[in-house]
Image (cartoon, rainbow, N blue to C red):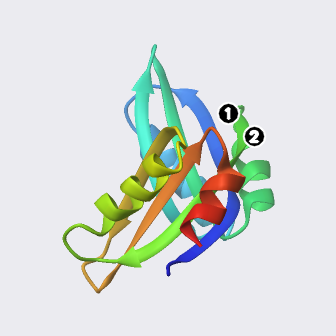
Amino acid sequence: MHNIVSETELHVITPNEPGILGRVLGTLANAGVNLRALSVFEHEDEGHFRLLTSDNKKAETALRSLGYKVKVNKIVAVEISDRIGAGAEIGALLGTAVIDVEYCYGSSSGKGMALLVFKTNNNKKAYETLR
């Protein structure tokens, strides 16, 4: 039905200050790591980056060298068609399966496909539900 994979994201915690986005993304670029998906928010004076990368080990090493905290989270990533209602269908499937979505982010380049990233209370069940 959908292109779905279980994988890991990096949750990077940084100071919340001007220029931090450029420093984090520049650090990845300098390490030769491609960014596949990104979510950034501020909470309690800290920057929080959720990153899907082409090489988590290289990214983690580079980011830790700057003193940033890095956690690894298991997530489910789903490639879907970029059309009205596609995300709603995914949400309905997860809801029907009684899977709690802890957080989700996504993007589309407007070229026919979109990427949704989920962390749930049961990623294995989410993966099986969406296959």
* Whether residue 22 is visible: yes
Q: Is residue 119 above or below residue 7?
A: above
Disc tally is 2
As drawn, the residue found furthest toward the left would be 84
Q: Are marks 1 and 2 in contact (CB under 8 Å)?
A: yes
Q: CA distance from mark 1 to mark 2?
A: 5 Å
Q: Which residue is mark 1?
A: 68
Foreground of the two, 9 or 13 = 9
Quarter of the image containing the C terminus?
bottom right
Amino acid at dot 2? Arg
As drawn, 43 above or below 62: above
- Name the residue at the top extreme: 44
Left or right: where does residue 87 sit relative to residue 131? Answer: left
Q: Secondary structure at mark 2?
A: helix
Q: Quadrant of residue 85?
A: bottom left
Residue 30 percent coordinates (x, y):
63, 64
Relative horizontal placement of residue 128, taking residue 114 as reference (left or right): right
Q: Which of these two is toward me, 4 or 15?
A: 4
- Residue at 57% x, 53% y is 51
Label placed on residue 64: 2
Q: Quadrant of residue 66?
A: top right
Where is residue 110 shown, x and y percent of the image? 24, 79
Question: Could you say whether the residue bearing mark 1 is in a helix, strand or loop?
Answer: loop
**Tag 1: amino acid:** Tyr
Q: Where does the image place residue 96, in percent across and percent down from the top left?
A: 45, 50
Q: Residue at x 77, y 60 (%)?
A: 58
Q: Residue at x 64, y 62 (%)?
A: 127
